[in-house]
Amino acid sequence: MGLRHSLADMREPWQRSHALLLLPVALIVATTIVDIHSPTDVHLGPTLIIAPALTPSFAGPRLTALVGALAVGGQFLVAEVHGGLYTTNHIVQIITLTVLSALIVVYCAVRDRYHAQLAQVRSVAEAAQRVLLWPLPEQIGPLKVASLYLAAEDEAQIGGDLYATTRTDGLVRVMIGDVRGKGLPAVGEAALLLGAFREVGYRHSSLPELAAALEKSVSRYLDDFEPPEEVGERFATALLVEIPYAAPLTRVTSCGHPPPLLLSPGHVVTVPELRPAPPMGIGPTSPEGYDLDVFSFHPGETLLLYTDGVIEARDADGRFYPLAERVAQWTEAAPAALVHHIRRDLLAHTGGRLDDDAALVALRRVPNTHPGRQHGLVLHADRSPQEPAAADRES
């Protein structure tokens, strides 16, 4: 069954290209017949080049060469009928048609080689994306999850934006970041930050401690590999988010990154006030240099994380994409539907092309079916989400 489907899939484009081949062949036959029956002072032979010129739009070099040979053959036939093969006019037309047909075949071969190289680059980019940006699970703990990555560079599928998740002791931790630069040149720094988060993201008891550990990793790398002329020019913004399973709140530490959006039912969009630290690479290496912001996050609400490639995307008139305004109409959409709506609307806003990499992560808290019993955590009824207990503020 599989072999039959594969043969059918291969046969379909083959049949389509050979059906389209009838068009240039018919053009050669018609032009040759008309030229033969035309007066001797009327020369339609030069129009035969149209046939091989059309063929590369649906066929490869071999079929293009075949059509070119048929066109030259038609020109020979016209020459034989109108004065013989050795007249100066016919010799020039035959040579010209042959040379132009050969050039078209060469162009077709170069184009196919370029397409093959492009396909290889795409496959490498896809492999790199799978290695660096592991697909986020559709659900992790009490959260429904969806993500989106849009690379700015043509044919690239990865760049300087990044996101990752990890779990530890009844908590979900999420990082979204944006390395200075875009496209493939920024992949190295993005890979460094992702690797560091995956290694230490679950080890530290608080987000400020985690931020300081990530800063040390980034600084150590820059000290060893940053070119002297780029000192202080390489950095990454990052947003570290921690969501307890049992408590309806979220904790955030910002390293120069745009704040998240909290989407609530009823088309309500809230922008939490954060106290950002400097970006990683130029930030503090002590936990005391980072703030922990806490705000409520109830079941049915969605937390939308994004990079500045989204909010700084411009339309033809130079206007930024109004993310908070646009997502107000989709506050009750599921995460997958939400990122789909934003992707379509963002590309429509920019005319289909972005000037910077863009990433989105949508997290929707679902109702807790076993309140206060997940992973040994107890949700105290007298604790306000806006004012967590001392243990929460310290952790």
Image: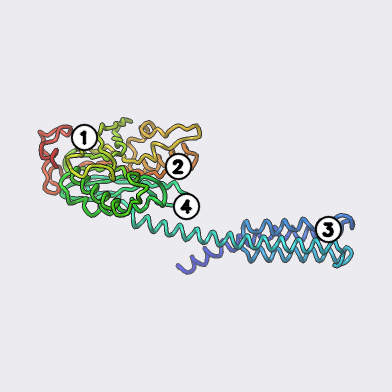
Do the CB atoms of the residues marked 3 and 1 lie less than 8 Å apart? no
Q: Earlier in the sequence, mark 2 or mark 1?
A: 1
Spatial CA span between label 4 and label 3: 47 Å
* Amino acid on which the number 1 mark rests in the picture: Ser
Q: Which residue is mark 3?
A: 35
Q: Which residue is mark 1?
A: 296
Q: Which residue is mark 2?
A: 355
Q: Nearer the viewer, mark 2 or mark 1?
A: 2
Which residue is depicted at the point 38% across and 50% down? 186
* Amino acid on which the number 4 mark rests in the picture: Glu
Q: Secondary structure at mark 2?
A: loop
* Amino acid on which the number 2 mark rests in the picture: Asp
Q: Which residue is mark 4?
A: 155
* Amino acid on which the number 3 mark rests in the picture: Asp
Q: Nearer the viewer, mark 4 or mark 2?
A: 2
- In the rendered image, the quadrant that contains the N terminus is bottom left
Color theme of the render:
rainbow
Please rate how many residues cluster around mark 2, counting C-alpha atoms within 10 Å: few if below 14, some from 14 to 19, many from 20.
Answer: some
Which residue is depicted at the point 20% across and 36% down? 294
